[in-house]
Image (cartoon, grey):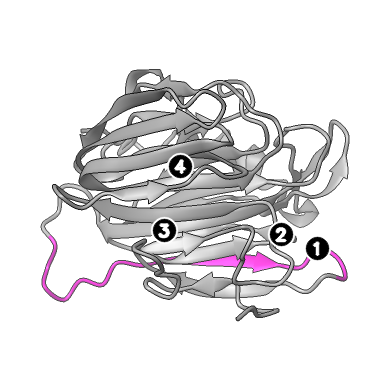
Amino acid sequence: MTTQSQWHFTSGELKSSGWELLLDADKPPVTGWAHTGIRIGIVSPGINLDIPADNKERIIFVLAGEGLSITYSSTNDGHSITQELRGRSSVFSGPTDLLYLPINTDISIAGSAKFAIGECPAKNPKPVKYIPKEEVPVAIRGTGSESRQVHGFGMPDNLDADQMIVVEVIVPAGNWSGSPSHKHDVFIPGKESNLEEIYYFESQVTKSYTSPAQASPFGIFRGYSSDEREYDLTTEVRSGDLVLVPHGWHGPVAAGPGYDLYFFNVMAGPDPERTWNVTDEPSQIWIRDFWNEKLPDSRLPYGE
């Protein structure tokens, strides 16, 4: 059943067909959603997950666990190939291996891990690409309490995809990401892109601290309308939660005091070109000048 107004789904709400979380852009939980999807799965010895060939391009990576063994074949030639992806202890342990698979690809996933798949309906088949973690672009953006770590999993300059743009972000405890608030909901060539955006969240007691029994990791997400289209969301987010941004200003996202926050973004839209151009909220642009007075957070970068 679709809804016009639910943009935040808590952990478990979109559990389906063996997946811990499944948002299919062809059968979305929100009316009008069309360009992006996501899957969160768990595999273990003897328990695999399969995806039949369809119109989606996908990027696959481990969230936490020992690793994955992905067997895939194109419906064009039927030739089967297996790619191993190394694991990581958690999403707060630095970047990880990635596998990009184009449309019309049968996929079988085995191993021992919790993993994520970003997916987007596409038209043009692109080359399969394996990206080892050593080649994932890592950037520290912002300064001071606005510092965060960005892993450029699938940007236009490092992945030849048809539609998708994907990144993951680590926000240390008490810090903010996505400031100034920004939007990408109108196509203006060279200035702004029109992109849906998915946020998948995880949170934990901040690195190097032992988690007390009463801990309840969380973050805060903010989004609001940029024009006549309705969108207004201020919500607490926790591990396994999903937030959808159909349009409008979004950010900042805040990590709760004492709790590191992680999110995985999947973006795509109807534009004739695959770009990630944003417009900053005019009343908040000045914050960029303020960054010049501070250094990046010394806790970053996070790694194994």
Q: Is residue 44 magenta?
A: no
Q: Which residues are the magenta region? A: 211-228
Separation of residues labelled 4 and 2 (CA atoms): 19 Å
Report the mark closest to the observer, 1 or 4: 4
Report the mark closest to the observer, 3 or 2: 3
Mark 3 or 2, nearer chain start:
3
Separation of residues labelled 3 and 1 (CA atoms): 24 Å
Give x and y (percent) for residue 253: 52, 58
Residue identifier under label 3: 201
Left or right placement of residue 149 versus residue 34 in this view: left
Residue identifier under label 1: 226
Q: Residue at x 58, y 50 (%)?
A: 178
Identity of the amino acid at label 3?
Answer: Phe
- The answer, for residue 141, to whether it is visible in the render is yes
The image shows a total of numbered marks equal to: 4
Q: Is residue 227 magenta?
A: yes
